[in-house]
Image (cartoon, rainbow, N blue to C red):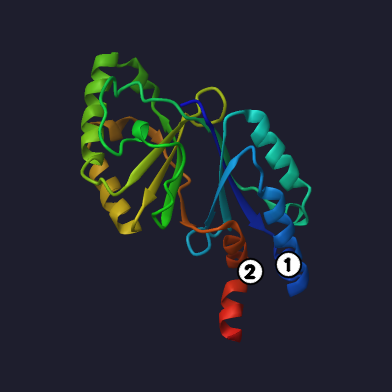
Amino acid sequence: MNELYRYLTLAVSNEWRRQGDRQREEDKAEFASAAQDAGIALHAYSLVGTRADADLLLWVIAEELDAIRGWESRCAATRLWAQSTRPYAYLAARRPSPYLGDHRHAGGETERPVGPVGDLPYLVVYPMTKKRSWYALPREERTRIMAAHFATGHRYPEIRIHTGYSFGIDDQEFVVAFEVPDVRRFVALVSDLRDTESSSYTERETPIFVGAAMPLHQALDHIDGATRRAELVR
């Protein structure tokens, strides 16, 4: 469990949206081609309809940072990249939770391969930072509090969590991602988690991204409505 996570958002410019259909299609095809790389695993999510400040969320998984850097450099050479901004980007590492000990359960985070399973339609991602008072508690006390936190999560077995640790390599301490079947189920989970003791030790957990999982070429078509235009033509 030593993979690295890179979460990157793209927001295209209005100037790019005003380009002709042919130019936009060429730009999307160029970007999709550049984004495919054997050294990384890439998962794409459309933010259309869920965020006003970003259009696309990319989750990149690699074993080495150089692979992520090389991938991003190739994407930077494309026209679409030049016509967009990256409002939010995060770097994190996968590792076992220090509060689980020897605990294991079917479908648990440590029992699954790295990355999304891919059978659920939405991904919720956000950075998180704990209050410093959390780390002043004895390890045994933190373990007790987190046990109640985990127990709440176990009541929602259809929601899968992916925890990334960012201590010392980014501005937040964690990046957490959840595969969810329905965003309303996630609302219920987070509402229940607010009642747990662990919630009082959260310093910050925004911005929050809700992405619809789909192939990259389809997520790119959602940005400029190409999918909808094709449906209207039929």
Give how far across and how far down residue 84 sits, in percent: 70, 55
Per the rendering, the mark at residue 47 is none
Q: How many other residues sit within 10 Å of disc 1, few (<14), some (14-19) or many (≥20)?
A: many
**Residue that sits furthest to the front in the current view:** 38
Q: Residue at x 24, y 18 (%)?
A: 141
Circle 2 SS class: helix
Residue under the image location 34 percent in, 56 percent down: 181
Vertical side of 209 occupied by 62: above or below = above
Q: Position of residue 38 (x, y in %)?
A: 65, 41
Q: Residue at x 60, y 79 (%)?
A: 230
Q: Quadrant of residue 149?
A: top left
Per the image, the residue denoted by label 1 is 24
Residue flagged by tag 2: what amino acid is it?
A: Asp
Q: Quadrant of the C terminus?
A: bottom right
Q: Quadrant of residue 174?
A: top left
Q: Is residue 78 above or below residue 132?
A: below
Report which residue position mark 2 lands on.
Answer: 224
Q: CA distance from mark 2 to mark 1?
A: 8 Å
Q: Quadrant of residue 69?
A: top right
Residue at 64% across, 37% down? 39
Can residue 194 be spotted in the picture? no
